[in-house]
């Protein structure tokens, strides 16, 4: 999968090339985790008994230290981006599954009954009714997963993963270059802030029906208002 996103080798050696690669290694796993979490969460909504064991499994997987996860995968995927991306995708499930389940369950029963009366089947009702109303909760989970993934990519430097800002941190410590350390730390923090801001903008874009307070945040009653 990662071959589809390969970049020119000369760009990888520039600072902005490292930034782009850092974003790639951080955000592809988040998107993969979201795609896996959507059907899993829907199963948990339909089969309530399934939710506790799924939540337990994702929590246990999240408790595995990232470095240990990387070391286990090296035997199968080598010193590659995939070794870094797989744990990040798995970690995102512990955020996405509860966020989607809680968001979908918050849809009022009368709204679902109205959709059913209009001829909506289960899939259409899920896609056109439940997911849009649950969008604020899903995007909130997306924000947490994205910021966490951006920070954890840097740990990949410990297994020799090339192409992320963590390599600047590693080089700065090895060659006693504080400038490289600051470029890595500040660059990672700025990336996390920018991605979070973009996701806030996305939330405003996809949920224009939600009333905002003076700070631009969605009011707690927005889901109930939207269902009326």
Image (tube, rainbow, N blue to C red):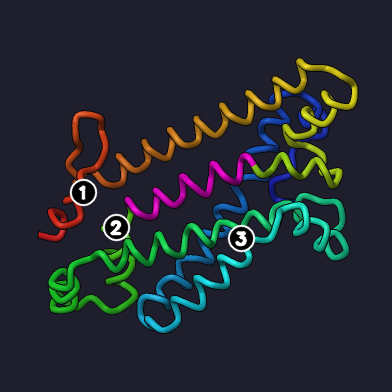
Local packing at callout 2 (Cα closer than 10 Å; few below 14, some 14-19, many 20+) is some
Q: Nearer the viewer, mark 3 or mark 2?
A: 3
Within 10 Å of disc 3 (Cα), the crowding (few <14, some 14-19, many 20+) is some
Residue 89 location in percent, x, y?
62, 57
User: Residue 218 lies in magenta, yes or no?
Assistant: no
Which type of secondary structure does the marked residue at label 3 adopt? helix
Q: Where is residue 110, by image quadrant?
A: bottom left
Q: Is residue 166 left or right of residue 55?
A: right
Residue drawn at the location 82% of the way across and 23% of the way down: 172
- The secondary element bearing badge 2 is classed as helix
**Which callout, 1 or 2, points at the residue further toward the start of the chain?**
2
Task: Give the x, y percent position of residue 141.
Answer: 44, 52
Closest to the observer: 219 or 39? 219
User: Which residue is denoted by mark 1 in the rendering?
Assistant: 220
Q: Is residue 144 magenta?
A: yes
Say which quadrant the C terminus sits in: bottom left
User: Mark 3 = which residue?
Assistant: 62
The residues colored magenta run 136-151
25 is higher (above) or lower (below) than 191:
below
SS type, badge 1: loop
Residue 218 vertical position relative to residue 55 in the rendered view, above or below: above
Quickly name the residue at label 2: 132
Q: Residue at x 25, y 29 (%)?
A: 215
Residue 224 lies, in percent from the top left, at 15, 57
């Amino acid at each position: 999968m990662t071959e589809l996103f390969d970049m020119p080798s000369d760009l990888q050696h520039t600072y902005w090339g490292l930034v782009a690669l850092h974003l790639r290694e951080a955000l592809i796993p988040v998107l993969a985790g979201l795609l896996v979490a959507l059907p899993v969460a829907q199963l948990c909504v339909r089969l309530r008994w399934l939710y506790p064991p799924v939540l337990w499994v994702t929590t246990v997987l999240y408790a595995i230290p990232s470095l240990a996860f990387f070391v286990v995968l090296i035997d199968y995927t080598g010193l590659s981006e995939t070794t870094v991306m797989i744990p990040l995708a798995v970690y995102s499930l512990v955020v996405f599954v509860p966020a989607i389940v809680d968001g979908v369950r918050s849809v009022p029963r009368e709204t679902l009954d109205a959709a059913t009366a209009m001829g909506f089947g289960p899939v259409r009702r899920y896609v056109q009714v439940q997911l849009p109303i649950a969008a604020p909760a899903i995007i909130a989970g997306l924000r947490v997963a994205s910021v966490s993934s951006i920070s954890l990519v840097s740990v990949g430097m410990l297994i020799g993963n090339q192409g992320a800002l963590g390599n600047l941190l590693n080089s700065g410590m090895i060659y006693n270059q504080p400038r490289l350390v600051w470029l890595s730390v500040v660059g990672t923090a700025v990336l996390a802030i920018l991605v979070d801001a973009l996701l806030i903008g996305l939330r405003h874009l996809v949920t224009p029906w939600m009333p905002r307070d003076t700070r631009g945040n969605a009011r707690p009653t927005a889901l109930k208002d939207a269902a009326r």
